Image (tube, grey):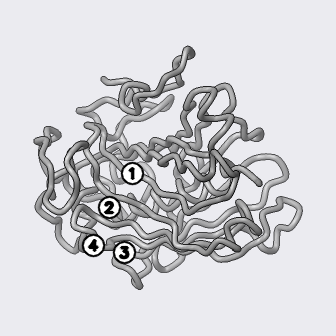
């Protein structure tokens, strides 16, 4: 199993925390290693979000037309039944790496520029690009609380996922106006939501489907500090007894952490999870990044 450090090519004297995720047991994860069958966290609704495995784990490396050579793009697998266009890339993977690109203007002048991300699979192949769509005033006046539209495109520039975050209060003392993000795939068609749950100390979110029905929960630590180590957010069943995935903010090295807000994340989930729920977990990762790891100017 390759380490997170090698995948991100990070220069750090202290190795980051990492999680061993078995390749051939996609339903096993983290400290509660147990087979995540359909009855494990969706009793009575076992066919809603779990789908049959889409294929083999080995994915050939290739560059895609229309994009510069260098980091290879993941070839598009056959789309599963009822799969939104562009989400077929998610059907064969159980791990996603999100790498925020460093903006030179931010480093030199401390102006907040639009965030840009690369989204890769565990082989280091690009799956998507993500770009923030906001104006200068909103970014630099609202900071980490800013509303945004994040557009996620595939290798030919087609927008396949749109994330919409409205303007909300980013204070735990105001439980009536908590954070939320809407995930659309394709754009204009909601497939799920991530909503913040009020808690005096801990970080809590609920993952909802397109009907706003609760599906999963996310739990994070009390103190959100990545200056010396990574931070893990566990994705659990609604009763919080079974861990079904994890969103991890990874240590990026002292200079990168101190002078930029370019972050590295990893997302783990069962391979046979519905692609729509995988897309919603990507949305949850971006909401967490903006809420807790964006630098205030």
Q: Residue 185: give its label.
A: 3
Q: Which residue appears farthest toward the top when viewing the image?
A: 13
Dot placed on the residue nearer the N-terminal end, 2 or 4:
4
Per the model, the C-alpha gap separating discs 1 and 2 is 22 Å
Indicate the secondary structure of the residue bearing disc 2.
loop
Residue found at the very far bottom of the displayed protein: 188
Task: Please tell me how crowded label 1 is: few (under 14), some (14-19), or many (20+) other residues with Cα within 10 Å.
Answer: some
For marks 2 and 4, give the one nearer the viewer.
Answer: 4
- Which residue is depicted at the point 55% across and 63% down? 114
Circle 1 is placed at which residue position?
118
- Comes first in the chain, label 3 or label 4: 4
What residue would you read off at disc 2? Answer: 274
Q: What residue is shown with label 4? A: 158
What's the distance in space between the residues labelled 3 and 4, CA to CA? 12 Å
User: Which mark's residue is nearer the viewer, 3 or 2?
Assistant: 3
| x and y, in percent, of residue 251 in the image | 57, 30
Crowding at mark 4 (Cα within 10 Å: few <14, some 14-19, many 20+): some
Task: Please report contact status of discs 3 and 4: CB closer than 8 Å, yes or no.
Answer: no
Classify mark 4: helix, strand or loop: loop
Q: Quadrant of residue 227?
A: top right
Considering depth in this image, is 249 or 131 the residue closer to the camera?
A: 131
For marks 3 and 4, give the one nearer the viewer: 4
């Amino acid at each position: 199993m390759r380490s997170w450090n090698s995948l991100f090519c990070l220069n750090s004297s202290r190795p980051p925390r990492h999680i061993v995720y078995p390749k051939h047991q996609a339903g096993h994860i983290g400290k509660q290693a147990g087979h995540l069958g359909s009855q494990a966290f969706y009793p009575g609704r076992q066919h809603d979000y779990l789908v049959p495995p889409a294929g083999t784990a080995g994915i050939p490396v290739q560059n895609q037309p229309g994009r510069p050579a260098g980091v290879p793009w993941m070839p598009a697998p056959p789309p599963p039944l009822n799969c939104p266009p562009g989400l077929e890339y998610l059907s064969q993977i159980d791990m996603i790496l999100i790498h925020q690109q460093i903006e030179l203007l931010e480093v030199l002048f401390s102006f907040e520029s639009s965030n840009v991300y690369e989204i890769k699979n565990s082989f280091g192949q690009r799956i998507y690009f993500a770009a923030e769509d906001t104006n200068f005033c909103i970014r630099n006046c609202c900071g980490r609380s800013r509303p945004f539209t994040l557009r996620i495109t595939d290798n030919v520039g087609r927008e396949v996922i749109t994330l919409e975050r409205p303007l909300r209060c980013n204070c735990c003392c105001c439980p009536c106006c908590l954070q939320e993000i809407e995930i659309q795939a394709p754009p204009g068609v909601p497939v799920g939501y991530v909503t913040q749950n009020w808690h005096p100390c801990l970080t809590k979110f609920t993952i909802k489907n397109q009907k706003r029905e609760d599906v999963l929960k996310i739990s994070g630590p009390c103190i959100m500090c990545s200056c010396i180590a990574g931070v893990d957010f566990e994705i659990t069943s609604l009763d919080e007894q079974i861990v079904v995935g994890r969103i991890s903010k990874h240590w990026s090295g002292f200079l990168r952490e101190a002078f930029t807000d370019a972050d590295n994340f990893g997302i783990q989930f069962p391979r046979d999870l519905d692609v729509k729920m995988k897309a919603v977990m990507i949305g949850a990762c971006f909401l967490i990044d903006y809420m807790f790891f964006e630098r205030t100017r």
